[in-house]
Image (spheres, rainbow, N blue to C red):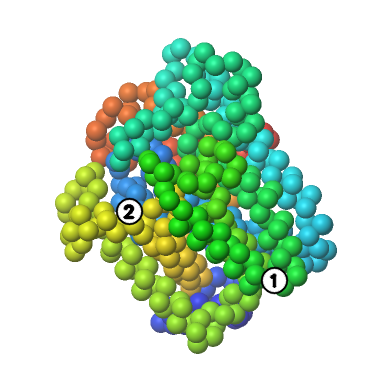
Amino acid sequence: MTTETLSVARPFFSLPTHWIYADTGATRDLRLDFMRGFVIPLLFASHFEYFSALMFIGWERIGVVSTAEIFVILSGIVVGMVYGKKVKKDGVGAAMPGLVSRSVDLYRVSVLMILLVAAIRYIPWIDSTIITTFHDPYAGVVYQLYPGLGASIFEVISKALLLQIGPHQFQIIGMYVVMFILITPFAFFMLQRGRVNLLLGLSWVIYLINYGLPEPAPATAAIRLTGAQFEYAFPILAWQLIYVHGVAAGYYKQAVLDFFNTEWGKVVLYVSILLSIGFMVFSFNHPLPQFPEWAKLHFVPADVFNQLYGTYFPKYKLGVGRLLNAVVLFISIYALLTRCWQPLNKALGWFLIPLGQASLYVFFIHVFLLLLIANTPLPGYDNFWINTGIHAGLLALVWVMVKKEFLFRWVPR
């Protein structure tokens, strides 16, 4: 039994020991792939907005967190593990070609997506509204994400190259481009020199400065460092916090796991589990009109919930409540996967792990599936079971495409 196993085994000591994740020391951690795969159905629930069975685990029902927070944390950890191994062995300079190559891949696929959607707008029998506009359900405003059809091709291309336009369902990839090329090298530079406390301290200072800035109306990022579209939803000053901490956690993965084998580590784990349950109960009080009354709790009055949500859980600025919820939920799920790996992997790993290992590919493909579904009569159905079938069918289709490696030659994974 490894140190890693001990760090998360004891809270679930009554369960069979052969369920535990077998740590082989490999760089790839299948638990992280499983988690990314688990987030994919939640992504479909968020972007294919047809009320179905998926909404009972999506739409912030397992806590006040979204797919974005989990994806960013996972991305940071994987970068810290994979490229950190090279940094420890040969230095930051040796890892830079890989980081630059990955940045170029992400940038290339982002620009390609933007230009493909821009071209699709000119096809008269295709309604591209679902991926060329963003509807704010709270403000009741529809935002145009592309210049008008009369705009010059030079304007479209220049905005595409600057990531200033594009489908909102894909814009988080633009954030990854900036994180990779600007933040990751600096993070590794600091980590290699043992300045982890200074690195994390600077990250918090930047986050808190952004958090305290006056908000424009409607609520969006007060400062957009890059001027790119993604910063309306994912401002770098806020979202760098969980990415940088993820990189540090991945870089010092074994040390982090060793901490959870200490007495204080066990306390943090137990508290994380309790807080995760508490946040889940809190989220069930969300007065979403789409959910039937039997699927809601009423411990927190609707007006109080909305006030707390708007104050402590805003997504665009990564509210402190949302931040805490994301961290404790991540710790809890990772512990659960470690201690109950064998049954969970047997039940769902065959489906979720391939999706998690090809998450960028799924991100790319799902935009066009969204466009396809929006141009059929299917969205016109207001039927829970038909909508559940739509979601299940789309997920099955994407899984088959991943297994068959459809377009893998052209679309990064």
What kind of element bears circle 2?
A: helix
**Mark linked to residue 195:** 1
Where 138 sits versus 321, above or below?
above
Q: Residue furthest bottom?
A: 263
Residue 302 or residue 368, whichever sits in front: 302
Residue 335 or residue 401, whichever sits in front: 335
Q: How many neighbours does mark 2 have within 10 angstroms: few (below 14), some (14-19), or many (20 or more)?
A: few
Residue 70 or residue 138, whichever sits in front: 138
Quadrant containing the C terminus is top right
Q: How many neighbours does mark 1 have within 10 angstroms: few (below 14), some (14-19), or many (20 or more)?
A: some
What kind of element bears circle 1?
A: loop
Mark 2 and mark 1 lie on one chain; the one further toward the N terminus is: 1
Q: Residue at x 65, y 41 (%)?
A: 106
Left or right of 348 in this view: 279: left
Q: Position of residue 202 (x, y in %)?
A: 61, 64
Q: Which residue is mark 2?
A: 310
